[in-house]
Amino acid sequence: MASWLLPEGISDVLPEEARRVEGLRRALLDLYASYGYEFVIPPLIEYLDSLLTGTGRDLDLRTFKFVDQLSGRQLGLRADITPQTARIDAHILNRSGVVRLCYAGSVLHTRPAHPLATRQPIQVGAELYGHAGLAADAEIQQLAVASLRRAGVQRVVLDLGHTAIVRALLADVPPPIAEQIIDALAAKDAPALRAAARVAPPATAAAVEALTHLHGDVRVIDEARRLLPSQPIIVRALDDLARLAEISDADEVGIDLADLHGYRYYTGVNFAAYEPRVAGALLRGGRYDDIGRAFGRARPATGFSVDLRDLVRLHEGDPAPLPIVAPADDDPALAQAVAALRANGAVVVRQLAPDEPLPALARRLCRIDGRWQVVDQD
């Protein structure tokens, strides 16, 4: 095997894509800062018991693990930055009240999320801690939609769900049976779901099977009120979904009450954004109140994240600025002209030798009437 080959699912980010990724990274972090979100840079590796706290087995399977030669303890290479921000909020910052944090950085997955996915996403996201109310969920969803618009997504389609509904339905079901039902729902496997739900109480089995049909536009909420038990938790969850759909900034809002992605992680409202050119969800987020408990502070939490590389593939963005080529000349006036151009944002490349070939379409700095001026290449 050639020494220059990279592992499957791993690729270089070449200049044009890297320029667009970095431009979007800056734009999104500026957007989050305008909402009051503070930027944090967690480490690439942590002790495994901290990195996987509260995230369930899904993240465990996606995390690379190795042994620290200094401590002998097991380390993990982060597969998601969200648990790290929860640790920072709960244990490092240790603030009372609402805390808003944002981040951007690479993560690494042992396996891709889907056949077309990279194993090294560049994750950017925002997390809000310390507020359990619907206002926090609304702000996070508003910021998620604004992120997609900033990235040039023309039509934002948002699907909403609520994990509390399934939890309430399965509250009295024995854990082994509940796990089978959850797995069948997640796989959209109707025969397996019916088989697993057969041993549950008839009302529970009927409600769980109804979930498989409760997806579509916001009218699904009214259908769910008719088909699901009128338990306070379920009624409140449906009320929350109705309100979030009503105030959403998205162009289209859907409801999917059987979407169990991250079920063992999310504790309330969860959401995903979709775009036809991206396999799977373009963006995911939701409420995950339990994660801070292991760090000593059970703080309410909600947030979202997205892969920057997915976003830049959807929108070409502005072309790279044409470079200006300065000749190999020691004239101090040329150095001053180059510095002035660069200070104003221009890209200026100094030739290293007089016969060095000029880049295609480049402009040139030429001395005209004793002054250095920018001219188009002939």
Image (cartoon, rainbow, N blue to C red):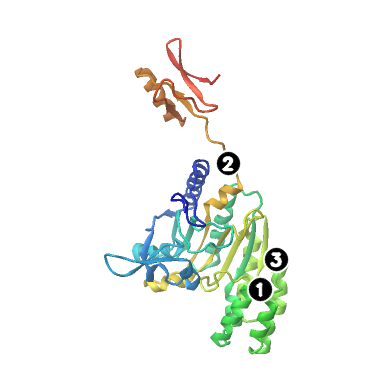
Residue at 63%, 71% (x, y): give it: 239
Residue at 46%, 70% (x, y): give it: 60
Total of numbered circles in the picture? Answer: 3
Residue 143 seen in render: yes
Q: Of the residues under marks 2 and 3, which one precedes in the sequence? A: 3
- Residue at label 3? 218
Residue mark closest to the camera, 2 vs 1: 1
- Secondary structure under tag 2 reads loop
**Residue 192 locus on image (x, y percent):** 66, 81
Question: For residue 236, which quarter of the picture?
Answer: bottom right
**Amino acid at dot 1:** Lys
**Amino acid at dot 2:** Gly
Q: Which mark is residue 145?
A: none
Q: Nearer the viewer, residue 375 or 25?
A: 375
**Amino acid at dot 3:** Val
**Residue 157 locus on image (x, y percent):** 65, 57
Q: Of the residues under marks 1 and 3, which one precedes in the sequence? A: 1
Residue 228 seen in render: no
Q: Nearer the viewer, residue 76 or 39?
A: 76
Q: Is residue 309 above or below residue 46?
A: above
Whether label 2 touches label 1, CB < 8 Å? no
Q: Is residue 131 above or below residue 207?
A: above
- Residue at label 2? 317
Residue mark closest to the camera, 1 vs 3: 1
- For this view, does 338 lie left or right of residue 155? left
Q: Which mark is residue 188?
A: 1
**Residue 314 locus on image (x, y percent):** 61, 48
Residue mark closest to the camera, 2 vs 3: 2
